[in-house]
Amino acid sequence: MINYPINIRNSGLSIYDPISPDDCDLYIPLYALERILSDAMIGLSLAGLPLRTRSKVVKTEICKALGYPIPRSFAKTQPRFPGQNFDTYTQKSLNVQIWNEEIDFSRRYVFFEVNDNDQISAVRVITGETLVQYDRTGKLTSKYQATMQHYTTSRLFSDDSTTVQDWIIEPSATLIEVNPNSLPRQNQLLRISEVYKRLLPMVGKSINYLDAVQERNRGAELRELICEHLGYSIYEDDGTYPDVANQLLEVKLQTSPTIDLGLHSPEDGAYILSLNGADIYSEDIRYAIFDGEVVGNRVYLRNLYIVSGEDFSKFFPIWEGKNSKIQLPLPIDFFD
């Protein structure tokens, strides 16, 4: 049996050096790649690692397993391992996201299953020709992103847009009996300065980190706290935009350098909804951005930034264009 890791180590090649699929000594066939990676990677613990660190650790261990020298930094190539023509996906769920490219039929796709203890528990290697069979839509979903900025203190960056300022009627009614997912009424919508005042006491509090891939659950805990501080007696997360519809408020908890804006950009001029006597556009939405720090198993809310959509990009630069992704479900027995 050919010892591919030793051959690769002796060749002096890096993960970026091309190898012909016809090279029987250096190009690892599908079945052997799965076996080598299974032997080396199953049992590897990723517990407590942030997503970026987790990705680097996995790629480092792959290099060790295959006999490659570990690069000083991993380049953002497509695929991530060009020499052996494969990409890697570390999966705690069966939902796969492929960013900014179509599925390549000739590429190999390496999937690592991560169990509830944050250990790699299975490895599966397939070709793009196999993977594409699980893509039920064939569509790229596009989303906007921005760069997180860190400020020394909490900040209220802007007033409401003119549309929102003119629509609000003061004094505001109590929110105790109001559903935070309902459309606002003129006497329910708080001014952006009042939103900032009510949420500012959250700074210094912490929420459960859970783990690096449970962003949705962390967000739910944060939004529940936000509803409490705004004056609501109930919390319901229906997954719609904006997060707290009754206050035209979108919420972001940032522990990474990239703000995921989803399908809505604050500056795209998109129509969002109609209120009594006013049409609300993307620039009218208010954003509450919590600057978080992971300490152990908690996320501490270090600062709060409140900004209107129309001023968002002045303080948090929006990336040009969109990032796109394919989402596809793997079959439930994929790793069996």
Image (cartoon, grey):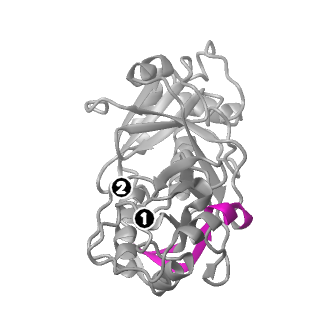
- Which numbered dot is residue 276? none
Instruction: Please indicate, yes or no, whether residue 255 appears anywhere in the rendered image.
Output: no
Left or right for 319, reference 243: right
Assess disc 2: are there few (<14), some (14-19) or many (≥20) residues with their C-alpha within 10 Å of its C-alpha: some
The kind of residue on which mark 1 rests is: Gly
What residue is rendered at 64% in x and 42% in y?
Answer: 322
Q: Is residue 232 left or right of residue 298?
A: left
211 horizontally vs 256: left or right: left
Label 2 SS: loop
Q: Is residue 303 magenta?
A: yes
Question: Is 228 one of the magenta-colored residues?
Answer: no
- Classified by dominant secondary structure, the portion drawn in magenta counts as strand
> Pointers 2 and 1 in contact (CB under 8 A)?
yes
State the image coordinates of residue 2 (x, y, percent, origin top left): 51, 22
Q: Against 261, is 300 above or below?
A: below
Q: Residue at 36% across / 75% down in the picture?
A: 225
- From the top left corner, tell me how far across and down residue 282 is, in percent: 59, 54
Residue 154's image quarter?
A: bottom right
Front residue of this view, candidates 205 and 129: 205
Residue depicted at 45% across the width and 72% down the height = 189
Q: Quadrant of residue 42?
A: top left
Residue at the far front in the pictured view:
277
Disc sitting over residue 48 in the figure = 1
Q: Which residues are magenta?
A: 293-314
Residue that mark 2 sits on: 118
* Three-letter code, disc 2: Asp
